[in-house]
Image (cartoon, rainbow, N blue to C red):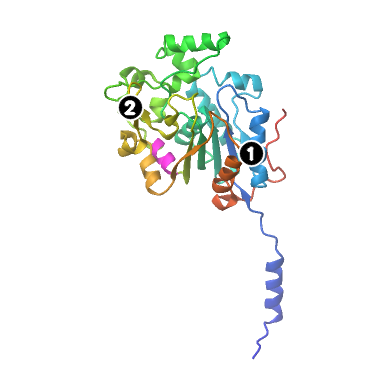
Amino acid sequence: MLHLLPLSTLLLLRAVLATPTPSSQPLPLLIWHGLGDNYAADGLHTVGDLAIATNPGTFVYYIRLDESPDSDKTATFFGNLTEQIAQVCDDLANHPILSTAPGVNALGFSQGGQFLRGFVERCNVPPVKNLVTFGSQHNGISKYQICGASDWLCKTYIGLLKANTWGAWVQSHLVPAQYFRATNDSTGEPTSDYLDYSNFLADVNNEREVKNATYKENLAGLDKFVMYVFEEDTTVIPKESGWFAHVNASSGEVTGLRDRKIYKEDWIGLRELDEKGGLEFKTTEGGHMQLSDEVLTEVFEGYFSPANGSWEGPKGQAHEQVEL
């Protein structure tokens, strides 16, 4: 026998079905560029445009240390990383859109990757859900970049770095020096100069005797931490730093992350993250920062889609407007 619903129930059901539901948009995406680049660069915005094309409605924010592209580029070479990350923490926490999001995703290129990790560990407001880095120096660098034969500006800069890496002025003013890592070849242990004077890396890797529990809690709280290494990378020395690996400078022997104290004793939450399936090690073809649209699209689909986190989104603005 067919049972008819009362008219009042039918009207109520009709009203519920007719009520529009909030549109589900991907979480906002933070992008932090690398050394010698700037937030308004065409190439960087091509990446952002691809993110939006892959996941429509994505609000993309290009991290910068100055609204002037030239000054932002200069800040990749010169500046105090402790102060720079604190500035980014303040900027994002007070951003009119990002501050309202329940979480964000983050994409870091080269040194921008470890800086985003520093953001996660030190403040993480808004909270990062998925962090993907390409060619980053998570375990630091053991050599500075090689300059072109006629690049005297580069040679002067590298000369300053090499002359006094652990000096107070260099550690507070020259950016690459602040993620340089020196070790004893025979033991693989960091040198006392590095532990005493490193302004950035020794701190965010929790290598000193007193550990910062917040760093571990924040990084372990990620849903995914995906680290890409470029197979033919000759810019980052050693390239395996992108996976937190240690490479003996004399023998070339590689000690993977899972065999290191930083993992075994879980100084920054990597083991906890790994045990819940949140840590991924990946490679991609080519030299440093030679990225294809195919690889980026895989990242955007696999880690930054609405299936990996969504929200109602900003009202009336799909992505950040930047004057190029």
In the foreground, 317 or 148: 148
Helix, strand or loop status at disc 1:
strand
Query: Whole-Å distance between the Cαs marked 2 and 1?
Result: 35 Å
The numbered disc on residue 60 is 1
- Does the rendering let one see residue 276? yes
Figure check: 182 above or below 12: above
Q: Which residue is mark 2?
A: 208
The numbered disc on residue 109 is none
In the foreground, 245 or 28: 245
Identify the residue shown where x is 43% and y is 9%: 163
Q: From the top left corner, tell me how far across and down residue 300 is, in percent.
A: 59, 44
Q: Quadrant of the N terminus?
A: bottom right
Specify whether residue 218 is painted magenta: yes
Closer to the chain start, of discs 2 and 1, is 1
Identify the residue shown where x is 65% and y is 19%: 70
In the drawing, does residue 189 fall left or right of residue 71? left
Label total for image: 2
Q: Which residues are magenta?
A: 215-221
In the drawing, does residue 290 fall left or right of residue 159? right
Q: In terms of image quadrants, where is residue 316?
A: top right
Q: From the top left corner, tell me how far across and down residue 122 is, in percent.
A: 45, 33
Q: From the top left corner, tell me how far across and down residue 224 is, in percent.
A: 47, 44
